[in-house]
Amino acid sequence: MILNKSKNNNKNKKIRKSNILDIHIVKRKGNFEIFNSKKIYSTCYFACLSSHMKDSEARKLSKLIMKNSIKWIEKKKQVNSNQIFNFVKNEIKKLNKDASFMYETHRDIY
């Protein structure tokens, strides 16, 4: 988080740092899209909930997968959506096989 001091207000205000990286993702149909880490979070989260995971656990796992994905993508010059899918699938599988199954088999639902 970045702290921002306003001249009109002596209290520190927290401003969320953007999780959107300045990288274009090559989609399955060949078009480009700017990377949005929230998409990884949401697909992981719903896969976790679909596997009957508790909400708090789903949020924790999804946040961890999102952070790991950002670190992985930052090291890449180019990445396509299939590579992201496989990375996320493998990361979820390390932590919860049921959620990984839901993520993998319900790809087009999200």
Image (tube, rainbow, N blue to C red):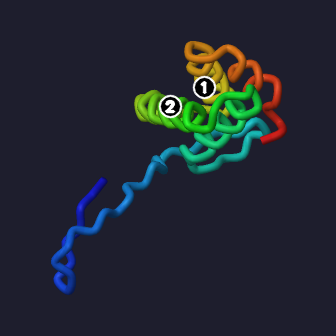
Task: Name the spot of residue 91 as percent of width and height, x first.
Answer: 56, 20
72 left or right of 28?
Answer: left
The answer to whether residue 80 is above or below residue 8 is above
The residue carrying mark 2 is: 69
Between the C-alphas of marks 1 and 2, the distance is 7 Å
Q: Position of residue 40 (x, y in %)?
A: 60, 38
Query: Label 2 amino acid?
Result: Ser
Q: Position of residue 99 (x, y in %)?
A: 69, 23
Residue at 71 percent across and 38 percent down: it is: 46
Q: Is residue 77 visible?
A: no
Quadrant location of residue 18? bottom left
Q: Earlier in the sequence, mark 1 or mark 2?
A: 2
Q: Residue at x 71, y 32 (%)?
A: 47
In this figure, which residue is indicated by the disc labeled 1?
A: 88
Number of numbered discs on residues: 2
Disc 1 and disc 2 in contact, CB within 8 angstroms: yes
In the displayed structure image, the side of residue 32 where residue 24 appears, left or right: left
Q: Does residue 75 appear in this view?
A: yes
Displayed quadrant of residue 53: top right
Say which of 96 and 56 sits in front: 56
Residue density around tag 1, few if under 14, some if 14–19, many if 20 or more, within 10 Å:
many
The quadrant of the rendering that contains the C terminus is: top right
Q: Amino acid at mark 1?
A: Val
Q: Which residue corresponds to the image point at 72% horizontal and 46% vertical from the top-left? A: 31
Nearest the camera: 23 or 1? 1
Residue 104's tag is none
